[in-house]
Amino acid sequence: MIHVENLTKYYDSFCAVDQINVEINQGEILGLLGPNGAGKTTTLKMLTGYFKPTSGTIRVNDFDIDTHPLEIKQMIGYLPESSPFYKDMLVYDYLEYVSKIKGIRPEDRHPRLRYLADLCGLNHIMHKAIGELSKGLNQRVGLAHAMMNDPQILILDEPTQGLDPNQIVEIRHIIKKIGQEKTVIFSTHILSEAEATCDRIVIINRGKIVADGNTADLKQTAGQQTTIQISLLNADPDAAVKTLAAVDGVDTVEQVSHTDDGVLKLNAFTSSDRDVREKIYTAVKATDWVMIEFLQEAKTLETIFRDLTKQMN
């Protein structure tokens, strides 16, 4: 549905987005994940046609954004990070005003507003002024605004930024519901949001894509080592490192600490697809050391994200 090729954006000599290539399929919820300043907002603004790329191509269906920007914009609903509201207007009046701007026919306006009020949970606040609403309710109004013209594509920039945990869950639920019918692209630096909401995650750092796939794919292909944390009592540090490093499947072993009370803490790293904990346990059991801690650190999206973005810093 969306084809992005060599997308690049410079601000004077600063490269904010550096030759991004990505295909976004119809009906997909895609999370654009990255630290602050990674280029997420710039990328989304180019997808919406708000920013003109320095170079590269954006195509939506059969339309190129350089030659058919209006046709593409008509397919997109956009919620920026800071929603521009008329805060003295009532929610109903504001959404009716938006419906007129969007060209909704008079006979279709009220049914559309009723549908969006149900979808975004606005029925109990339609009579309230926007300026009286919480951040979470403001985001719901912004979602209704973005969905007014029934777009094929919904683009959301940091939609849960500044919300409390309950509000985040509510917005997540709405996004997933919309994603059953629409293509949704949203940016975030909240790892749990991407993992809980998205079908697919694109990680961007310093304007470059460093990973692309679902959570399971990222965990499998990121080259991430598994860390096994071991604490031993009455073990000589050099002998323990040597013994554990010799275990089949263990890549390296590092000493973390050795306390005065004789507790030696080690990290064993493995890239093996097989679970090597049984072999480590057997190796320790053959000694007179006492194992008092044995913990495997799971491969998480957070550790993958941290390693991928740290590599370019």
Image: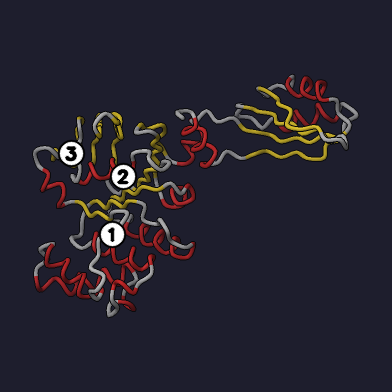
Front one among 306 and 273: 306
Q: Looking at the rendered structure, which numbered label has been put on residue 96? A: none
Q: How is the image coloured?
A: secondary structure
Q: Give the labeled residue for mark 2.
A: 41
Q: Which quarter of the figure has residue 208?
A: top left
Residue 218 locus on image (x, y percent)? 47, 36
In primary-sequence order, the first of circles 3 and 2 is 2
Q: Which residue is mark 1?
A: 83
Compute the Cα span from label 1 to label 3.
21 Å
| Three-letter residue code for mark 3 | Lys
Which residue is rendered at x = 67% and y = 23% of the image? 252
Determine the image quadrant of residue 147.
Answer: bottom left
What is the CA distance from the residue labelled 1 to the residue labelled 2? 14 Å
**Residue 86 at least partly seen:** yes
The reply to whether dot 1 and dot 2 touch (C-beta < 8 Å) is no
Name the residue located 52 percent from the left edge and 33 percent from the top edge.
Answer: 307
Amino acid tagged 2: Thr
- Counting from the top left corner in percent of width and height, residue 243 is at 79, 21
Image quarter in which the N terminus is found: top left
Disc 2 residue crowd, few under 14, some 14–19, many 20+, Cα 10 Å: many
Disc 1 packing (10 Å; few <14; some 14–19; many ≥20) = some
From the viewer's perspective, is residue 120 above or below residue 290?
below
Determine crowd level at label 3: few under 14, some 14-19, many 20+ residues with C-alpha closer than 10 A.
some
Q: Position of residue 163 (x, y in %)?
A: 43, 61
Total marks placed: 3
Residue shown at 21%/46% (left/top)?
48
Q: Does residue 57 sit above or below 178 in this rendering?
A: above
Q: Secondary structure at mark 2?
A: helix
Q: CA distance from mark 3 to mark 2?
A: 13 Å
Q: Secondary structure at mark 3?
A: loop
According to the picture, the residue beneath numbered tag 3 turns out to be 52
Is residue 9 visible to the viewer in this orientation of the structure? Answer: no
